[in-house]
């Protein structure tokens, strides 16, 4: 599939964001978190690019597999999912309902990443939700919220309830549905989803064994500082360069077009 490059038609800042978001899609596919062509990862363009009064976002062209997405195929839309730059690719307004709700409520939401993984949906169906049984879970539990299932999320009237449930949390478990994370940047959102997904996989695995040992609640209160130390204060940016190199070694760096 030939996709004309937008590199010379957008600002350098937007192009870098496009490359990072396309890399994120490729990584989600590489780690096995994608659900065919369904779910979305959205990134908000900074005001210096979109204009102080306009909020524009990048989102996947609906119908492409995550490992097909490139920097130029990403579609720029407004808060109503109307195309800002003409694109031959369709977008999914219904799929943008959750993302637009989060972006509208959280001005710090530079990236919103949503998945339907087997482990994530599995834990989302458990009444107790995420259990404090692993180191990974402590990072999630320190900033976790829940939103009850209301059917396929395509109705605008669900937005206020989702926004209220999310609040200031960075991890949102969509009951009977999947996982969602909010990050100020694409690398930060990816790292948070990595922690969320592994938390759920570990929990499902542990529940097949014997009696579970729970982490002391006092430890969860201090995980923010632990993460800062672990990443040298860089958060997701600490791991991002190595993840991009991983795409290159896997032959998955065709997104840079």
Image (cartoon, grey):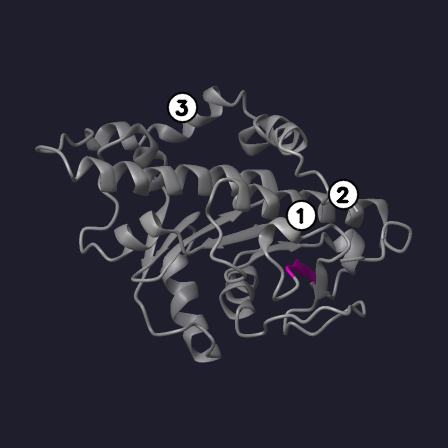
**Residue 174 included in the magenta stretch of the image:** no
- Measured as percent of width and height from the top left, residue 93 is found at 58, 74
CB contact under 8 Å: marks 1 and 3:
no
Where, quadrant-wise, is the N terminus in this rendering? bottom right
Q: Mark 3 points at which residue?
A: 226
Camera-near label (2 vs 3) is: 2
Report the residue that reaches farthest toward the front.
Answer: 1
- Measured as percent of width and height from the top left, residue 109 is found at 56, 52
- Residue drawn 27% across and 31% down? 134
CB contact under 8 Å: marks 2 and 3:
no
CB contact under 8 Å: marks 2 and 1:
yes
| Residue 44 position (above or below residue 183) | below
Q: Mark 1 points at which residue?
A: 22
Give the quadrant of residue 176: bottom left
Determine crowd level at label 2: few under 14, some 14-19, many 20+ residues with C-alpha closer than 10 A: some
Position of residue 43 in the picture relative to residue 176 (left or right): right
The residue segment tinted magenta is: 56-60
**Residue 58 included in the magenta stretch of the image:** yes
Our reading of the magenta stretch's main secondary structure is strand
Report the residue that reaches farthest toward the left.
Answer: 211
Tell me the SS state at disc 1: helix
Q: Nearer the viewer, residue 104 or 100?
A: 100
Position of residue 189 in the picture relative to residue 145 (left or right): right
Report the residue that reaches farthest toward the right.
Answer: 8
| Residue 51 position (above or below residue 185) | below
Q: Mark 2 points at which residue?
A: 256
- Measured as percent of width and height from the top left, residue 171 is found at 40, 48
- N-terminal-most mark, 2 or 1: 1
- Measured as percent of width and height from the top left, residue 211 is found at 8, 33
Marks 1 and 3, how far apart in space?
30 Å
* Residue 109 in sight from this viewpoint: no
Marks 2 and 3, how far apart in space?
34 Å
């Amino acid at each position: 599939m030939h996709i004309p490059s937008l590199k010379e038609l957008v600002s350098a800042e937007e192009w870098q964001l496009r490359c990072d978001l396309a890399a994120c899609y490729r990584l989600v596919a590489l780690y096995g978190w994608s659900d065919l062509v369904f779910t979305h990862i959205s990134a908000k363009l900074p005001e210096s690019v979109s204009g102080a009064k306009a909020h524009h976002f990048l989102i996947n062209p609906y119908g492409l597999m995550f490992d097909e997405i490139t920097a130029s195929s990403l579609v720029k839309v407004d808060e109503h999912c109307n195309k800002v730059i003409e694109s031959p690719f369709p977008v999914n307004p219904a799929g943008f309902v959750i993302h637009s709700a989060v972006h509208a409520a959280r001005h710090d939401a530079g990236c919103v990443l949503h998945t339907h993984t087997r482990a994530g949906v599995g834990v989302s169906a458990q009444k107790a939700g995420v259990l404090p049984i692993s180191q990974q879970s402590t990072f999630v539990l320190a900033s976790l919220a829940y939103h009850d299932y209301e059917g396929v999320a395509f109705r605008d009237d669900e937005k206020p309830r989702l926004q209220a449930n999310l609040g200031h949390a960075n991890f949102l478990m969509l009951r009977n549905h999947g996982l969602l994370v909010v990050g100020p940047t694409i690398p930060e959102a990816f790292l948070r989803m990595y922690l969320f997904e592994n938390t759920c996989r570990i929990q499902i695995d542990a529940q097949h064994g014997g009696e579970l040992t729970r982490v002391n609640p006092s430890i969860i209160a201090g995980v923010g500082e632990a993460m800062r130390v672990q990443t040298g204060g860089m958060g997701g940016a600490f791991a991002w360069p190595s993840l991009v190199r991983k795409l290159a070694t896997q032959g998955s760096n065709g997104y840079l077009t």
